[in-house]
Amino acid sequence: MKALLVCPAERPAVPLLQRSSPLVLLPLFGRCLLEYWLEQIVTLGASHVLVSAAHEAREVRALVGNGARWGLKAEVIVESCELTQTNARREYCGQSESAWLAAPNDVTVLDHFPGLPQHPLFQSYAGWFAALLEFLPHAVGPTRIGVRELKPGVWVGMFTRISPTAQLRPPCWIGERVRVGPHSIIGPMAIVEDRVVVESDCEISTSAVGAQTFVGKCTEVRDSLAWGDSLLNWRTESFVTVPDPFLLSALGRPSLSLTPADWLAQLARRGSRSPRASRALEQQLPLRRDR
């Protein structure tokens, strides 16, 4: 059976989310929306998937490949603009409807998590954060490896180090290779993506921290999306670029092989003006590789 996944093009309501990657490739709980949907259509019985992309098709094709990772045959189709469901059915399903999954699963616009069409992701930042919270208990899924539920409502990824004096308040999600310093509080309603460094005495609640973000000592993040040096209040949509890299900053391009030593080196290159912060981070993150 066939299925068509339509990648959303630009969504003017959420420009920050699409600043560095296509919306379908945005990291959400350590995976992207397209990955969640490819897993979903397999469970629905699809064996052949077409992925329609109007922008950044090259990046989409790099992720999808030939579909073998999901046990599918996959093709990426480049379009001049985003297709509507009606136009997509007319153009691709045509007279061979019996070869496709039954509607509405035959054509899906990837603007929501699987099973949550009532929670659109890209109509507002408040809606995006609400959708994250709704999906949080389901983010582990049957194919996720290494995520542990430390206590009810608290999920932590592999190779993450959390100080014994830190507090984790449910619901919260902490991704892979994250560092949480002493006396910091994560949650409630907090999502910390992969490879984030949270220094000591921080508080993150009702917020999401994007991958590869450094949160400096005594920083409070509330009702916000913190991503690199960008801080956006999802309630009011007020936005600021944080000028001090030792309060909030990007740790560089994501890398599966990034270690605490690499993070420390990046911070040292950017911030010789604040040796105190580098010393504090060195004390919190011993320079050894995860095993």
Image: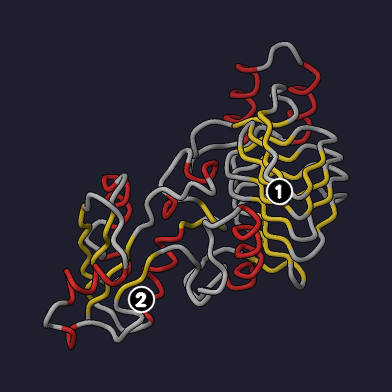
Viewer-proximal residue among 269 and 259 = 269
236, above or below 217, in the image: below
Extreme residue toward the top, this view: 273
Across and down, in percent, residue 238 comes to 70, 40
Residue under the image location 31 percent in, 51 percent down: 60
Side (left or right) of 81 relative to 183: left
Across and down, in percent, residue 64 comes to 29, 57
Mark 2 residue type: Ile
Residue under the image location 76 percent in, 32 percent down: 216
Structural distance between the alpha carbons of marks 2 and 1: 34 Å
Which numbered mark, 2 or 1, is in the foreground of this view?
2
Task: List the residue tagged with mark 2.
Answer: 41
Residue under the image location 47 percent in, 71 percent down: 143
Q: Residues within 10 Å of mark 2 (few under 14, many from 20)?
A: many
State the quadrant of the N terminus: bottom left
| Tag 2 near tag 1, CB within 8 Å | no
Q: Which mark is residue 185?
A: none
Quarter location, residue 147: bottom right
Q: Earlier in the sequence, mark 2 or mark 1?
A: 2
Q: How crowded is mark 1: few (under 14 residues within 10 Å), some or many (20 or more)?
A: some
Across and down, in percent, residue 254 comes to 49, 39
Mark 1 residue type: Arg
Say what secondary structure mark 1 lies in. strand
Task: List the residue tagged with mark 1.
Answer: 161
Extreme residue toward the left, this view: 95
Quarter location, residue 267: top right
Across and down, in percent, residue 145 comes to 52, 66
Side (left or right) of 277 relative to 124: right
